[in-house]
Image (cartoon, rainbow, N blue to C red):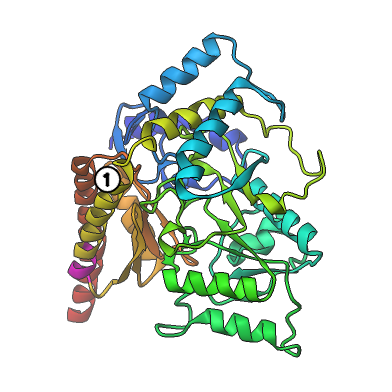
Amino acid sequence: MSTLEETSIQNSKSIFKRRESEVQSYARSFPTVFDKAQGAWLTDTDGKRYLDFLCGAGSLNYGHNDPDMTEALVHYIQANGITQGLDMHTRAKRRFLESFEQLILQPRGLDYVVQFTGPTGANAVEAALKLARRIKGREGVISFTNGFHGVTLGALAVTGNEHHRAAAGVPLGNSPTVPFDGYLGEGVDTTEYLDQVLSDGSSGVTLPAAVIVECLQGEGGLNVAGSEWLRNLERVCRKHDMLLIVDDIQAGCGRTGDFFSFEEARIEPDIITLSKSLSGMGLPMAVTLIRRALDVWEPGEHNGTFRGNNHAFVTGAAALEKFWGGNSFAPEVRRKGALVRDRFTAIADAWPQACVEVRGRGMMQGVAMTSGSQAADICSAAFRNGLVIETSGADGEVVKCLAALTTSEDELNQGFDILEAAFTEVLGQRECHRETTAAA
């Protein structure tokens, strides 16, 4: 890159350096100014194109600017459709609820009422925690190692990551932490530990109101809860009169190959939180799904000004009708998930000294490295060559693919070709450095 080009980039980003808070994170990993997006691709202000394997941290399962969602939204806006509706009934909300009922709930035999919370996933989690405590009259909520549920105070209390917890500024309590599936090694069912603790009046753990769990931990490192473990967890919840909350904010909306991440395990949570890709187009939207008998809210008892984003209702309904109106989308996602697994496995096999294991399920997979610095360097090298991909895990040690579910197989392979080259660039240089050092 020439000095003139570097100066141009620095000038184009000066306003961000001058006015934006130091809390920004993704901008540090992807240092350019993005301008346009379509499908699986991002384009920056210099015209450089990037394959997007991040997709708004899982909020763009159907890719960027889907033409049918765009058309529906533009038509709605031009017809003077309501934008902000609080929780009033609107035509846009009616269509979303009808689509969700007919395409998602009824085919799965589920009977949940829908609470529209504030616009983020953390808002949905806060509502779920508050409702569980109200129903059971108890304060505690069991959470799991490496869990991530948001950074507002209630959600943060059930989040494991110390980097985020340390920013709270106040004690975070009422959430005993239990080992997630696999945390203590293969063959150890940690639900047995939970059952024992709750059965022992001297364990020091007071009977909680609920358990909150991700079936596939996104930010925690792509740790997968096995189906048998989830069924055992559900049995423990029923035995001890606790509610089961599934946080499906990142792993839901088709990401694992089913609309809900818990479908494979054949469990039925009491409460489900959804957000991210629910609007289909990346517009802010979140809901808490509540088993009908548990809907004990008083009117207005939990609210939020922006719980009625009608533009999100329009695109959300369009997404459900386009992708979940038939029987072909979920199998297609599973086929692509198998491709992603094969490509990550090939990478892990090529670099056994640096790659620990392939993790995840469906279109939410990655490879765990021996160090976070390796993973970060690989993602940086990939970005320089036109691929946006992030890390996850307690130490950022997992290279994590969240490509849109609509990404073509050719695009997936193109992205993995870039990623393989990044592994070679970073790990090959380190291997060469070690050999040079040893020779000296």
Q: Is residue 27 above or below residue 192?
A: above
Q: Quadrant of the C terminus?
A: bottom left
Rendering coords of residue 13 (x, y %): 48, 32
Q: Quadrant of the N terminus?
A: top left
Q: Residue at x 42, y 31 (%)?
A: 321
Apparent side of residue 31 relative to residue 88 in the rendered image (left or right) = left
Q: Residue at x 52, y 48 (%)?
A: 25
**Residue range highlighted in magenta:** 347-351
Count of numbered labels shown in the rendering:
1
Rendering coords of residue 290 (x, y %): 64, 50
Q: Residue at x 36, y 23 (%)?
A: 67
Viewer-proximal residue, 359 or 351? 359
Q: Is residue 252 above or below residue 196?
A: above
- Visible in this render: residue 63? no
Viewer-proximal residue, 139 or 6? 139
Apparent side of residue 409 relative to residue 137 in the rendered image (left or right) = left
Rendering coords of residue 80 (x, y %): 59, 10
Q: Which residue is labeled 1 in the image?
A: 332
**Residue 142 located within the stretch drawn in magenta:** no
Q: Is residue 199 above or below residue 8?
A: below
Apparent side of residue 184 relative to residue 210 in the rendered image (left or right) = left
Main secondary structure along the magenta-highlighted residues: helix
Viewer-proximal residue, 33 or 231? 231
Dot 1 lies on which element? helix
Question: What's under tag 1, amino acid-wise?
Answer: Glu
Rendering coords of residue 214 (x, y %): 52, 61
Residue 216 appears in which quarter of the rendering? bottom left
- Visible in this render: residue 263? yes
Viewer-proximal residue, 180 or 325? 325
